[in-house]
Image (cartoon, coloured by chain):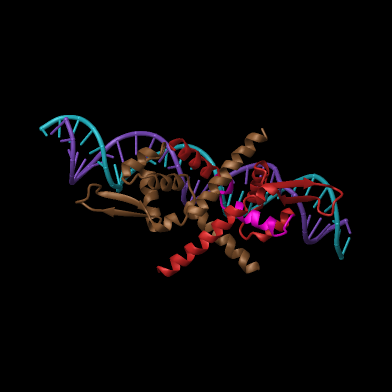
Chain colours: A red, B brown, C cyan, D purple
Amino acid sequence: MERNQKEEVQALQDTLYVLGGKWRLPIINSICNGNHRFREIERSIPGITTRMLSRELKEMEINMLIKRTKDRDAEIQVKYESTPYCKSFGPVIEEMIKWGKSHREEIIRNS
Amino acid sequence: MERNQKEEVQALQDTLYVLGGKWRLPIINSICNGNHRFREIERSIPGITTRMLSRELKEMEINMLIKRTKDRDAEIQVKYESTPYCKSFGPVIEEMIKWGKSHREEIIRNS
DNA sequence: TAGTTTGGTATACTCCATGATACTGGTTAC
DNA sequence: GTAACCAGTATCATGGAGTATACCAAACTA
């Protein structure tokens, strides 16, 4: 039980670490929405800088959330795609969206 | 569709904002685990400082995640409790735990 | 009545995520 | 051949999250 608690907090913090920061979620969202080139993704996320996008994409590649492919002979030379692993996030993201929405409603209701 | 996307990203970032930071989840966890006094919670979370705990508890009270009651005549004079609202987090937290655990397994499997 | 516990506050600091801005080497479009 | 676009990198600045440490008044406890 006690051991289990620690494990759960650890798991929570891991998830938070992977999802954390300002840009991860918008990036995942953008890629899953059909943006695959660097500049495309950049333009689709208001406020992000090339620097942050570059950094985040690298980190996310390390975390196996996205795949970067470079193919000189393809129409899109550098291509970012979400991995099946990224899609495994689906349920978490859904629940977070649900919660965020009802949170907003609650705030409005109480103000 | 486009509008919906923005709303969803917003909702995600709201959730992240409320859950974010290093200590929120451990604190929720601790309170839900039966710790209700300040020093109890503090001792149950290794590494946290009184300053951070104090700050976080205040913020969480504002966000209606916990309730603080002061009753001079009660056995526990200052008492922190999770709200039903906090409990509405259940599904999010569960999914995050699931994801975090499988993430760890994945990392181990691939190393 | 001295020591400990409780519920915090105050002050000063560090470090890191993010921001701002500029630049680059290659490719495609006109 | 030059202008625009692509996929980034390099530097520097900054605000805020988190840390360290000390302190406080009130209650309780031996």
> Looking at the image, which is closer to me, A42 or C4?
C4
Up/down of A110 relative to C24, above or below: below
Q: Can residue B97 be seen?
A: yes
Residue A3 at x, y percent in the picture: 46, 35
Does residue B43 show up magenta in the picture?
A: no
Residue at 44% across, 44% down: B26
Residue at 72% across, 59% down: A34
> Looking at the image, which is closer to me, B22 or B98?
B98
Up/down of B18 relative to A18, above or below: below
Residue at 25% across, 47% down: B76
Q: Can residue A42 be seen?
A: no
In-image side of B23 versus B74 (left or right): right
The C terminus of chain A lies in quadrant: bottom left
Residue A103 at x, y percent in the picture: 47, 62
Residue at 47% across, 55% down: B89
Magenta-highlighted residues = A17-36
Dominant secondary structure of the magenta stretch?
A: helix
- Farthest residue in the front direction? A1
Residue A89 at x, y percent in the picture: 62, 51
Count up the numbered dots.
Answer: 0
In-image side of A50 versus D6 (left or right): left
> Looking at the image, which is closer to me, A18 or C21?
A18
Up/down of A44 relative to B50, above or below: below
The N terminus of chain A lies in quadrant: top left
Up/down of C14 relative to A74, above or below: above
Where is residue C29, by image quadrant? bottom right
Residue A68 at x, y percent in the picture: 74, 46
